[in-house]
């Protein structure tokens, strides 16, 4: 079972997170940010991971610290769960429609953090959620998971639908890239390491 439990406490957030790559889509998510709970549930379900998150953050200031720090801890948990990377697919590109919105997420479990985010036209908020935090979440995840992640929005009008498309696609792409392929011998790199 490729899984990890991490606790992280700062002056701004206290987070306990359990993550399993080889899961079934089970979630227990309480971040204090309702829209993020919804998006993480979609990510987990469509990636068929298992995820439990409990966050006590300073949301009386704003949502930024909680959202970013959860991205950090989820990235750390993924990095530690994936292990030696022997036998994994490594790459995945997934396009995901959500009504009028279509986004593409591409992942390389490369050991090199690099993030590209081409998403234009989001409204400032979805409900009480600051949409600029989507980029912050994925930047934090990418840096700590040590993956290359490209998120591109082809088109869309409804901000909720656009972000939902992205999180669903993120789950689907991460699942494919982290899957064990019996045809892959050792680490999928000509360098012999990732």
Image (cartoon, helix red, strand yellow):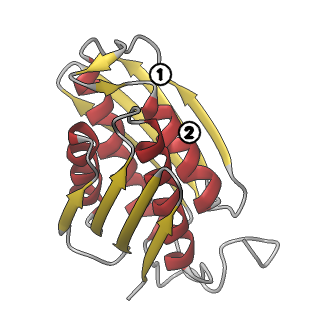
Vertical order, 132 against 23 (above or below): above
Residue 189 vs residue 75, the one in the foreground:
75
Tell me the crowding category of disc 2: few under 14, some 14 to 19, or many 20 or more residues within 10 angstroms, Cα based. some
Residue at left offset 37%, top offset 15%: 122
Residue at left offset 39%, top offset 44%: 58
Residue 37 vs residue 117, the one in the foreground:
37
- In the picture, the disc for residue 178 is none
Q: Secondary structure at mark 2?
A: strand
Q: Residue furthest right?
A: 191
Percent from the top left, x then y, of residue 81?
Answer: 49, 78
Percent from the top left, x then y, of residue 78?
Answer: 49, 68
Measure the alpha-carbon separation of dots 1 and 2: 10 Å
Tell me the crowding category of disc 1: few under 14, some 14 to 19, or many 20 or more residues within 10 angstroms, Cα based. some
Q: Residue furthest bottom?
A: 1
Q: Quadrant of the C terminus?
A: bottom right
Quadrant of the rendered image containing residue 169: top left
Percent from the top left, x then y, of residue 168?
Answer: 29, 45
| Residue 122 seen by the camera | yes
Percent from the top left, x then y, of residue 86?
Answer: 60, 83
- In the picture, the disc for residue 150 is 2
Residue at left offset 58%, top offset 51%: 142
Q: Which residue is mark 1?
A: 119
Circle count: 2
Q: Secondary structure at mark 1?
A: loop
Q: Quadrant of the N terminus?
A: bottom left
- Sequence-wise, the earlier of marks 1 and 2 is 1
Vertical order, 63 against 52 (above or below): above
Residue 151 appears left or right of 45: right
């Amino acid at each position: 079972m490729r899984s990890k439990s991490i606790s992280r406490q700062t002056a701004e957030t206290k987070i306990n997170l359990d993550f399993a790559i080889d899961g079934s889509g089970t979630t227990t998510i309480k971040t204090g940010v309702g829209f993020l709970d919804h998006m993480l549930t979609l990510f987990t379900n469509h990636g068929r991971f298992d995820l439990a998150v409990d966050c006590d953050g300073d949301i009386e200031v704003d949502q930024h610290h909680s959202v970013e720090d959860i991205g950090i801890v989820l990235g750390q948990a993924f990095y530690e769960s994936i292990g030696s990377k022997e036998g994994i697919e490594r790459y995945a590109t997934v396009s995901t429609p959500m009504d009028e919105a279509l986004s593409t997420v591409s992942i390389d479990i490369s050991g090199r953090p690099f993030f590209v985010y081409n998403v234009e036209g989001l409204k400032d908020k979805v409900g009480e959620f600051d949409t600029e935090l989507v980029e912050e979440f994925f930047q934090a995840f990418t840096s700590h998971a040590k993956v290359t992640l490209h998120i591109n929005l082809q088109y869309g009008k409804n901000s909720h639908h656009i972000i939902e498309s992205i999180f669903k696609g993120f789950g689907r792409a991460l699942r494919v890239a982290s899957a064990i392929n019996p045809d892959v011998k050792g680490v999928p790199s000509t360098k012999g390491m990732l």
